[in-house]
Amino acid sequence: MESLHITGPSDGLRRGLGVVLLVALLISTTLCVLAWRSDGGDATGTDERAAARDEARAASVHDLEILMATDHRDAARTVDGWSSVTTGRLHRQLGEQRKALFKRLRQTQEVTTATTVEAALTSWDEAAGTARLIAVVELKTSMKGQDVKRHTVRYLAMTQRAKGAWRLSALQPLGEVS
Amino acid sequence: MKAWWRSLLDRLGRPVALLALALAVTVTAMGTFVLVEDDDPEPGASADRAFLDGAATSDLIAVTSDLVNRTFSVDPKQRKKQQRFRADHLATVAQEQFRELYAPYLSKKTAAITLVTTTSGVGVVRLTDDEAEVLVIADQMAVAPDGRSNAGTAQVRLSLTRGSGSWQISSIDPI
């Protein structure tokens, strides 16, 4: 009986506390879900766009290095490589000039390696699937009867997403060769 | 009071239920706090707003182009005006780097040489709210008083910081 006397008033208090805690739980759960949805949704969208931008940059640099590289010892692979990283008019031009390119490679016996020193996007349009990149590229070239030459070239590369991959659509030299 | 309500109150009033509720409130409140605090993006790909924020990127490119053309051009007739411009738009470190790089055009012996810099490309490496890194390719032409001229292309990586709304060059790194 004594216990009933003690628990009587505290039962009411505990019930009241229970209700308050239940309401607090409902409010904090709602806020937590809202914060999670807001935070998660924004971050995912931004992360995906950032990844797409970075992919465009990396692919453009890769394509440019392939297009700048030459090896007469494997002319077919060289020219096929150029074709594989290009699209549009540039791609068509390479296809039309294929025989002439083979001939030139045989004559010059050129071997060129290209290394990108710096590159950065000047534009990127995710919806249109287009990007522009400026790049400083170091070329190391050897040709029949000539010493190895090193020079720095700068290009404005225009790229386009075609069949799910970034391809070079045009190339414009910037400034002078040094 | 209805029976179901009384039953619910009875259950909520039990010590175990109170403890569980208190724990659940604490956990969800902490979760909310962490998510709200985490709103600032971590430094990484998505913290770099280059091209994700089209207006900010276009503004940076336009400002950089103008800054480069004016900072890296030397006109003997506007020496003081250009010095003031550099003092306003270059941080102390960048001013020292500029003086070191362009000493030949700033010395008294060659003070009459005019150097015209024209930006041909600005690429954005990284952009945040108050910092940016850009790659700049620019054509430069030096003209001596006797008419002799020399042209070339320069490439440089610039770091910029934004203070009170305007961009300032904080570092100049020739490539």
Image (spheres, coloured by chain):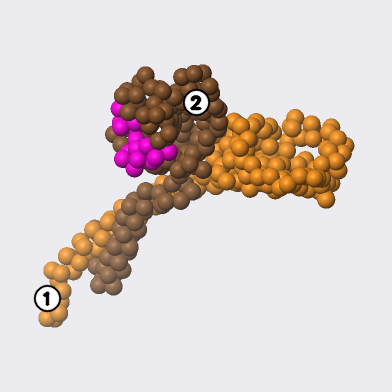
Chain colours: A orange, B brown
**Residue A64 coordinates in the image, percent (x, y):** 67, 42
How would you rate the neighbour count of disc 2 (Cα within 10 Å): few for under 14, some for 14-19, many for 20 or more? some
Whole-number angstrom distance, CA of label 2 to CA of label 1: 101 Å
State the quadrant of the N terminus of chain A.
bottom left
Residue visible at 45% across and 43% down in the picture:
B173
> Which region is colored magenta?
B84-101
B30 falls in the magenta region: no
B93 falls in the magenta region: yes
Residue visible at 35% across and 40% down in the picture:
B96
Q: Quick one: A46 or A146, which is closer to the camera?
A: A146
State the quadrant of the C terminus of chain A.
top right
Disc 2 versus disc 1: nearer the observer = 2
**Residue B166 coordinates in the image, percent (x, y):** 34, 32
* Chain of residue at mark 1: A
What residue is pinned by disc 1? A5
Examine the rendered structure and indicate whether residue A13 appears above or below residue A157: below
**Residue A115 coordinates in the image, percent (x, y):** 63, 48
Residue visible at 33% across and 63% down in the picture:
B27
- Type of residue at label 1? His
**Residue A85 coordinates in the image, percent (x, y):** 72, 42
Residue visible at 40% across and 49% down in the picture:
B41
Disc 2, SS: strand
Asked whether the viewer can see residue B130, the reply is no
How would you rate the neighbour count of disc 1 (Cα within 10 Å): few for under 14, some for 14-19, many for 20 or more? few
Disc 1, SS: helix
What residue is pinned by disc 2? B142
Q: Quick one: B82 or A154, which is closer to the camera?
A: B82
Q: How many marks?
A: 2
